[in-house]
Image (tube, rainbow, N blue to C red):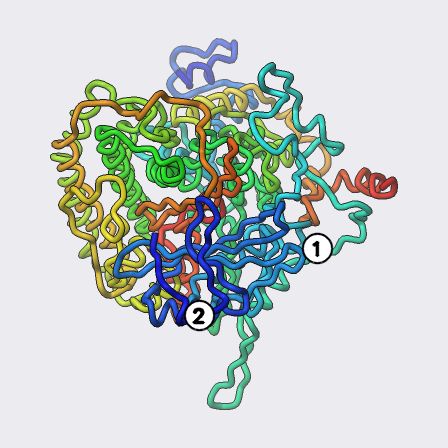
Amino acid sequence: MENQGLNSPGYEIPEEVQGSVAITSIDRIYNWGRRSSVWPMMFGLACCAIEMIATAAGRYDFSRFGMEVMRPSPRQADLMLVSGTVTKKMAPTIVRLYNQMPEPKYVVAMGACASGGGPFKEGYNVVSGVDKLIPVDVYIPGCPPTPQALINGLIKLQEKIDGQSIKSVRWYQKGDLAAIPMPILGPDLIYQEQIPAIKEASKEA
Amino acid sequence: MTTLDFSTRFPEGVVADEREGYEGYIIAADKLVEFATTLRDEYGYDYLSSVTGVDYIAEETFEVVYHAYKTIGGAELVFKVQVARDKAEVPSLTDVYPGADFQEREAWDLLGIKFTGHPDLRRILLWEGFNGHPLRKDWQEAYYEADIKPFKSRWPKPEYARAEARNPYGANVKYPEKFDPEKWVPEGEDALYGSLAKYETTDDDGLKTDHLTVNLGPQHPSTHGVFRIAAKLDGETILNLKPVMGYLHRNHEKIGERNTYLQNMPFTDRLDYLSSMSNNFGYALAVEKLIGIEVPERAEYIRVIMAELTRIQNHLFAIGMFLNDIGAFFTPSLYAIEERELVLDIFEMVSGSRMMCNYFRFGGLARDLPAGSLQKIKDLVFDRLPRKTDEMDRFLSENEILRSRCVGQGLLSAEDAIKYSAAGPVLRASGVPYDIRRAAPYSIYDRFDFNVALRYNGDIYDRYIIRLDEIRESIKILQQAVEQIPEGEIQTGKPRYQMKVPAGESYGRVEGPKGELGFYLVSDGKGNPYRYHVRAPSFINLTAFGPMCKGLKIADVVAVLGSIDIVLGETDR
């Protein structure tokens, strides 16, 4: 089924070479390769990580989607599964891990906490969602999402990858991608882009 | 509760706590160390379970509350120290009970109570430089809305506005007045690495050698989450090691003091997220003790069944992950998770959720067992689980590599285990037969015939094998419980959203899979707890982690950590 999609560019292929010749577009074959071998980073934050492990294990087995190779090092990973509550103390580390990942890279916010703070949103040490720090591709609701929900989210990610084009994705534009500035642990978490605003506020006080 | 007469031994400085609903003794701060030493050496209270602080803002005092036990069994002894809020200094008990180490640091971090004489009083859950001490009653976070829930903005008519919209920065942040971010110098890690002390050795030829500092985590595959270790090495040998936590500090206690009593139940699920049913159990016991409510017979049985199933699946997971740590990458885990899924099926059947069960209620349970679930449990405990436990035992326990990595490594003697307030399998693998189900039976555990699993060597191997022993004992309890379970009610009175909780304090504890899980509650008679503290076994077991690792090779650290079996949700709360 996959190959049919890959192998139907709209050109007629002579019958005698159909078994050995395929014509496709660069985008298609590239995306097909990417989406079929998304390697997640072995990175667990909280409760959701346990469901992530359960999804990797025998019963749900996300290696069916080409995702069984969990890499502990961000340098070898394509996908950051943010599985759990993002705390302020952890925030600089998460941004650093994201910056260390090579492009193309994707982020899935798994569960309520990673999507928006979840039940712990009001906490003084909790960041209201990982999208306050890094760009997110897919959000998966649930507390924690069941393995089925996680797999559904990963399929959505694959659909998103299928729809991308080398011409327009941000990591193939001219120039280097700027690294995301790491937040600083001050009296509270300091987002670097907010420094002028904080300075302004302190003058008024 | 225990009543002792201290009047001859301590004519002054020790008085009984006579506030309504309170118990124990109030000790003068200058007598505290002497009192604790006497308690340990003469009265036999050798195990300090919990240390925490309470901010009585109306009385302008901080109270530090200690819960001590005898390891031969029996009820707790509570003693307290009261100090003025503006001069919050209490002598440290780390010399008498080294297990107080991390707990005193936590009280310093979150409440700002200074423990004089503490060897390493740094922040433990937050970072150095954080503004204020968040559990103080006059400290407000960025998203502060009101003191208690349910918030007026959502109840009775919903007028919901996003918390971000109310905050000038659109994020969960708040800075002190006149704070200049450009002049801020991060405190960094100097205090942490400084606390490891400088070592320098001279070898036989007079060559001086500096030592190496190694950092592991918070992102590391064998730390079971976001846990960090800083170690000082001589070659590969560990000279000193400090755990660093707080990367998953989710402000459980601050949120808990704002919630109503019942609202806290789903939050306890997320403490030790592998064993939500036991967490529910401990919290329900603490609140029931305050209200003085009885639990119907059938509900008691279902509670025990759920708690023991939790223990089994937790230990399975712990063994699987421990084998991962020592290099048997994922194959044993897959075997363990296969069985765990079957237990989770039962949880999903009874509560609707695989992991976050939220199943217990004060005076009973949320709902009865659905049709067919009891039969499923019976199939598991009479047939599948005993068989599969034996299978794991056969595959793993005599494995050459496992034995050579684990036997005789990471030793913790019985005296040290008690000294460092270790709990659960860690304590019992060192030869201390202390199990709360036996030592101070709660619920209906006194009706079942089971042994307290015990191993004597206190090494990594014993901490592994004792988990298999405990699975077998749990199966034994389950086999009795599913046979004896009667028909009947599952809830005393009508299920209610809001409970009337009289003023007072209570400490409810259960033998969770990881050890003694305690909930310390202070009620002021209102709808939400005035103080809500969790005695987290994962957190306190880590006190012994540094001493256990000293002298080992750096590669064994992950094996020792895996054998303690921590869950970061509970360690950091």
Frontmost residue, A101 versus A91: A91
Image point (81%, 38%), residue name: A197
Residue B498 rendering spot, x and y as whole percentages = 46, 25
In the picture, residue B559 is in which quadrant?
A: bottom left
Q: How many marks?
A: 2
**Is B158 on the left-hand or right-hand side of B360?**
right
Against B210, is A128 above or below?
Answer: above
Give the SS element for disc 2. Answer: loop
Image point (35%, 65%), residue name: B46
Q: Between tags 2 and 1, which lies in front?
A: 2
Give the residue pinned by disc 2: B10
Against B144, is A1 above or below?
Answer: above
**Is A75 on the left-hand or right-hand side of A202?**
left
Give the SS element for disc 1. Answer: loop
Against B23, is A199 above or below?
Answer: above
Q: Chain of mark 2?
A: B
Seen as rendered, the residue at the extreme bottom is B205
